[in-house]
Amino acid sequence: MVIQAKAKSIFEDVKGKYSDPNAKFVASHGWFNRFKQRANFHNVKVSGEAASVDTKAAEKYPEVLRKLIEECGYTAQQIFNVDETGLFWKKMPDRTYISKEEKTIPGFKAAKDRLTLLLGGNAAGDCKLKPLLIYHSENPCAFKGISKATLPVHFRSNRKAWITMALFNDWFINLFIPKVEKFCRENDITFKIMLIIANAPGHPAHLDDFHPNVKVVFLPPNTTSILQPVDQGIIANFKAYYLRRTFAQAVEATDRETGKTLRDFWKSYDIYQAIINIVKAWAEVTQVCLNAVWKKACPQFVHSFKGFEKDETYEEVADEIVKLAEQLELEVDVGDVDELIESHGAELSNEELTELEAAKVKEQTEAEEEVEEPRHFNTKEMALAFRETDCNGKVREDGPQFLTILESEQRH
């Protein structure tokens, strides 16, 4: 198993530093099963599809899907697709001096801080879903004074920043179904929805039985890179828009009048600012793009959109990013942009994983130290408190017994 091999590899790297250098770890099947239960782990999609792609199944499936759609009477507005993708939200192209400098600094690199997004919409392109964002920290320092309920994304967290089966289940029941039901009602459409998703263990099969008006259809295994609409350009365009927006902000922030350097801007760029840029980049993905990506799975629904403004191509956005980089005096070409966009699915090294985990623990500890939870007393505890005070409200000489009694009562 890949995960067991990776666990053994990490153990070998860190055992001398954190434990007995002679310690042994076998990463047995029993350990793996317990790990899955602890982490609520079912499937992690690292980058697109597995190496083996079933081209025959991919060629046959569009006709199977077309017949199913016709039999059930679905329209383009009623058919949705979503997929998850990773994003290194604070990463510069490798050849830039910012990236090179960061690599020389010991400890966790901000460029390796990855979050996961669930993105998607319908085949008509007129219903774009609010992003689901999973981060490794429940309360990042950048959220101080900000209610997560006001964020322009559905924010969730777990230590690995992964979409687990439980999170996907929660998204489907509590976010997706209410959203599409409202969309149908507001547009006078019959509430009858088809959700097409990748065939992955992280996407529970029982979802198809949850709601009579929502049918869940799984793409054949190993066809995602060919058939899945979101993977046919939406994700790449979104990441290019995100990078362009970030670079444009850097150009504006480092205007000569401000005296601010690129290093200053990048150091202050935090997860809250990244979320705002994620939402604005997602808003840049057009209806034309959302519709065009269905060409392979459902070609019958793709239109020319006559009268609409011509959609930006990925290549045009990449060229703009290069021009912005020049204004920042960064050495970046289109190949660097492509490499950065593709790198969001790259696997972290053992050292990077260890440093990332240490950084998460440090941030969590700092957050816990900042927030001191108020102590709450129940009726029984209050009665004990009053019993230990005199009529003037002063603690009696034997008052400290109150704390002992409280501790004894709370243990029981």
Image (cartoon, rainbow, N blue to C red):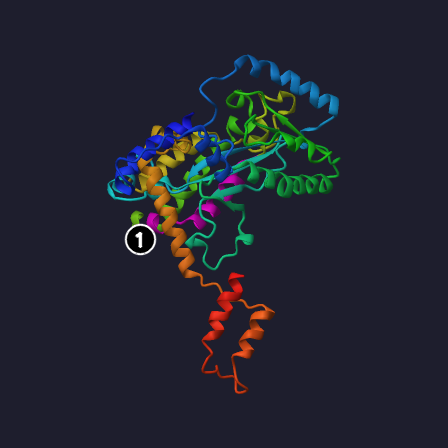
- SS at mark 1 in the image: loop
Whole-percent x and y of residue 206? 65, 31
Image position, residue 247 (x, y; %): 38, 42
Task: Report the residue that reaches farthest toward the top.
Answer: 56
Res 122 quadrant in image = top right
Q: Residue at x 43, y 31 (%)?
A: 316
Quarter of the figure with the N terminus: top left
Quarter of the image holding residue 310? Answer: top right
Residues drawn in magenta: 264-286
* Image quadrant occupied by the C terminus: bottom right
Q: Name the residue under label 1.
A: 260
**Which secondary structure dominates the residues rendered in magenta?**
helix
Tell me if residue 332 comes above or below residue 137 in the rendering. Answer: above
User: Which quarter of the figure has residue 292?
Assistant: top right
- Is 246 in front, or is 114? 114
Res. 324 in view: yes
User: Which residue extends farthest left?
Assistant: 104
Position of 194 with respect to 336 (left or right) is: right
Instruction: Decide: few, some or many residues near mark 1? Use Cα within 10 Å; few <14, some 14-19, many ≥20.
Output: some
Above or below: residue 122 compared with residue 270: above
